[in-house]
Image (spheres, helix red, strand yellow):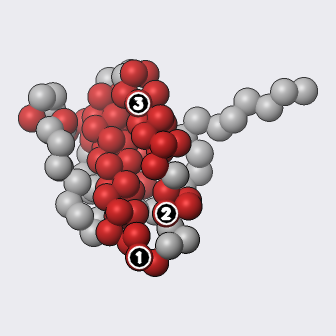
Amino acid sequence: MWSIVDRANGYLVEKEPWKVAKDEGRRAELGSILYAAAETLRILAILIQPIMPGAAQRLWDQLGVGGAVEARRVPVDVAWGGLKPGTVTSKGEALFPRVEDD
């Protein structure tokens, strides 16, 4: 799972969606980048559910997918493309709060 997280993070660093968002002519590209990020999070929610059920469900809810993440099954529900384009996401509290140095 950490490999997926690392690759997704690297993808976002490479694609720089915060910069793409500033260019109106790149809206389709921005949509593709954000879809890839959200779809990766959807799959990660399913994968982490057995070991972090609370965080997985909160992520699932924030993604706007609906239902219980625990009802999803590997490998069927982790196939790419399960997130419907146009799904409305919501901002929630941090799933994993930052640890502050004292």
x and y, in percent, of residue 37 in the image: 38, 48
- Residue type, label 3: Arg
Q: Quadrant of the N terminus?
A: top left
Asked whether the viewer can see residue 23, the reply is yes
Q: Give the number of the mark in front: 1 or 3.
A: 1
Classify residue 51 by image quadrant: top left
Name the residue located 27 percent from the left edge and 56 percent from the top edge. 66
> Crowding near pointer 2: few (<14 within 10 Å), some, many (20+)?
some
Name the residue located 73 percent from the left edge and 30 percent from the top edge. 99
- Residue type, label 1: Gly
Q: Quadrant of the C terminus?
A: top right
Query: How much space separates mark 1 and mark 3, taking CA atoms?
Result: 27 Å
Q: Please indicate whether residue 14 sits to the left or right of residue 70 in the image.
A: right
Whether 59 is drawn above or below 99: the answer is: below
Q: Secondary structure at mark 1?
A: helix
Classify residue 95 by image quadrant: top right
Residue marked by disc 2 = 20
Residue marked by disc 1 = 25
Sequence-first tag of 2 and 3: 3
Whether 88 is drawn above or below 40: the answer is: below
Residue marked by disc 3 = 7
Sequence-first tag of 1 and 3: 3
Query: How much space separates mark 1 and mark 2, taking CA atoms?
Result: 9 Å
> Crowding near pointer 1: few (<14 within 10 Å), some, many (20+)?
few
